[in-house]
Amino acid sequence: MIFFGRLEEYIIFFYRLLLVFFFYQLARVLFYIYNLELIDINSISDFLNICYRGFAFDTTAILYINSLFILFSILPLVFNTSKRYQKVLFYLYFITNLIAYALNFVDFIYYKFTQTRTTTAALEAVQNESNGLGLFFVFLRDYWHVFVLFFIVAFIWIKVYKLIKFKNHLTTNSGLGYFLSSVVIFLVIATLCIGGIRGDFKHSTRPITLVDASRHVKILSQADMVLNTPFALIRTINKNYFKKQNKISEDIVKTVLNPIKQYNNVTKDKPNVVILIVESLSREYIGAFNTNTNIPNYKSYTPFLDSLSQESLIFPNTFANGRKSIHGMSSVLAGIPSFKVAYTSSPYSNQDTQSVVSILNEMHYDTSFFHGAPNGSMGFLGFSNILGFDHYYGKTEYNNDDDFDGLWGIWDKPYLKHVNSVLAKKVEPFMATVFTLSSHSPYIIPKKDKGKYPLGTLPMHKCVGYTDNALKEFFKEAKTKEWYNNSVFVITGDHTNLIDYPYYAKALNRFSVPIILFSPKGDYKGVNNSLAQQIDVYPTIVDIVGYNKPIRSWGRSVLNDTLVKPFAITNSSSTFHLQQDDYIYVFDSEKDIGFYNIEDKGLEKPLKKVSDSIKNTLRIKAKSFIQDYMNRIIDKKLTAE
C-alpha cells in the first residue's frame, strides 16, 4: 500500500490544515460584520465570491505560517505518532497559528481607521510611539469584546483540533517501503505548498500580491475582505516600493506634471503663516463642506469651523494623500505624498528636501513646529529636523503634565493657548505649524468638558466638538495679538477617522479632508469646488508669500496655477486612484484596473465607453506622477536645483 501505515497520519494532518482554512474564513466573516459600513456587498453571490477568492490568499498565508508544522508532520521519523511528539506538534501548531490569526482580529478595529489591511508600513506608527504599552491597554479596554471573541474562537479551535486523535501511538512500519512512500508523499506535499504559496503553478505568473485581490471583485473596497492580515504583512516584509522608472519621456513629464514650478505673485508685506493640521479632521464632520452632499439628516459637529468657513476660501473637494499622521505632515509641508510605504519611513527620507519650511527659512521667517505629544512621537521630531524647522515645541517644552491626557499628549485647549503665548513672543514674519491631537482614539475629552459637546452617533463626534471649540478659543485669543492681522491661516486634516454617513464610506471619500484658507484681511473668500489635495498646500503658501524662485512640487497653487489641471492622487493597499476632469482612473502602477465617472467615489460602476484619447491622457498623467515621484526620491532630487 502506498501509505505503508501512514494513512491515519495524513488524514489527521490534512484535517488540522483544513481547520486553519475554516477559521480563516470565519475571521473573514467576522471582519465583514465589524466593518459592514465600509465594505459594500450587494448580494449573497458577491459575498460567496469574496470568500471563494480569499481562499488563494488564505492558502499563501497558511502555508507560510504552518511551514514548520507541515515539515515536522510529514517527515518519516517513525515516532511521529507518539504522544510526546504530538504534543510538540500541538504547541507548534497553535503558537504559530494563533499569533498570526490574532492579526486578523486587530484589523476588525484598526481597519475602521485606515480602511486598508495592515501591512508592514503600519509598523512605523508603533516604532515612533513611546507609549505603545499604554496604547495596547487602551485598545484592550475599549475593544475588549474583540479580545473576548478571539479567545472564544481560539478555545473552540483547540477543542475541535483534539476531536480526532491517533488510535495507536506506536508506529509498527519502519521498513524501506515506509521511507520510500513517505519521501514520495513529502515531495508531493512540498510541490503543492510551493504552488499554494505562489498562488498557482504557472511559470509565467508571479506570486500573488495584495493587488491581485482586486482582480475578481466588483467593487474595489471588497478587495480588503478578500485579503487576510497575515498575508498583507508577509507580502510587504522587506519590500522596497521605491524603484526607478523610465516609462515616460522627461519632456512629457514636464508638460503634464510641471514638477518644477515658479510663481510670480508680488507681496508687499510678508504675511505670517499658521498651518493648523487637525488630527483626524474629516470633511464629514464640517457642515460648511457638506452643503452639496445631499446627506439625509446631516449634522455638523464643528460650529466654529462652519462660521470661519464663511469668512474663508474653502475647498470642499479636497483629498488626503495618505492615511496616517506622518503622511499628512510630509504631504502638507513638503508636498510629498505617501503611498504603499511612507516616504518618511523609507531609506530615502534623510535628504535635502525643498518644502514650505526651507522656502520660508530662505525668506528669513522664524519657523516652528508645535505638537503636544511626547517629543519624537509619530516621527514628527525627526522629520521636522529634516525639513529644517528652527524650533520644535513638544510635550517637553510645554512642561506641565497636569494637562496631559494620560495617553497621547497635552489636551488641545491648553496646548493651543500655549501656542498663542509662544507666538506672541516671535519676531515677525514667522511660520508655525500646529498639529493637534485630541480628536483621536480612545475618544476622550477632559472631565471638565464632558456634556458640553454633542455626543453624536460616534465616539469621535464629541472629540471633534472639543477640538473645534479649542480652535475657537485659539482664534479668539489670537485676534488680540499684534501678529494676527498680517497672517494667513491654513486649516486641514491629516487623515480621516470614524465614518458615520455612507457617503463618506465610499472608497475615495475615505480620503476626504478639508482645506480652509483664511486671512483676517479678507483676502481669501468663497467656495472653490475644484479638485484639491494636501500636496497643494505647500505650493499655495509659496505663492501667497511671494517667493519667486523655482520650487519642486507635485501639487499646484490652488490660487493661481493654470499650467497644471486640478487633480488628486491617492493610494489604497494595492491600487492608485487618479482623479482629474470628469474621470477617476484606477491602476496598480503597471496596468489599468478601471475608469470611472468622477462622481462614482465608491468605484462601483466601471465605465464601458471611454475614448482612447481620454484613457491615454489619464494613463500618462498617472505614470508621469509615479515615475517622477520615484525617481526624484531615489536620486535625491527633492529640490528645484
Image: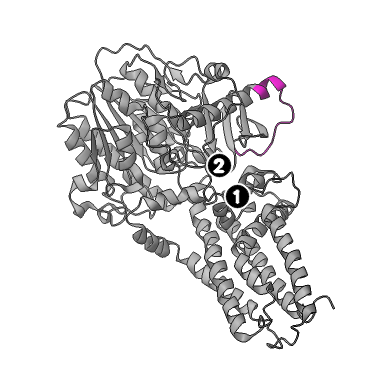
Which quarter of the picture shows residue 228? bottom right
Crowding at label 2, few (<14), some or many (≥20) Cα neighbours within 10 Å?
many
Note whether 87 is above or below 309 in the view shown.
Answer: below
Numbered range of the magenta stretch: 602-616
Residue located farthest toward the right when viewing the structure as drawn:
1
| Residue 10 location (% of width, % of height) | 74, 75
Q: Position of residue 334 (x, y in %)?
A: 39, 30
- Measure the alpha-carbon separation of dots 1 and 2: 10 Å
- Identify residue for label 2: 572
Answer left or right for 387 relative to 70: left
Q: Amino acid at mark 1?
A: Asp
Front one among 638 and 583: 638
391 left or right, relative to 157: left
Residue 605 is a magenta residue: yes
Location of residue 145 in the rendering, given as x and y in whole percent from the top left corner: 48, 66
Residue 280 covered by magenta stretch: no
Identify which residue is drawn at 51% across, 48% down: 238
Q: Residues within 10 Å of mark 1 (few under 14, many from 20)?
A: many
Q: Compared with residue 84, is residue 36 higher up or lower down, i.e. above or below?
A: above
**Image mark for residue 510:** none
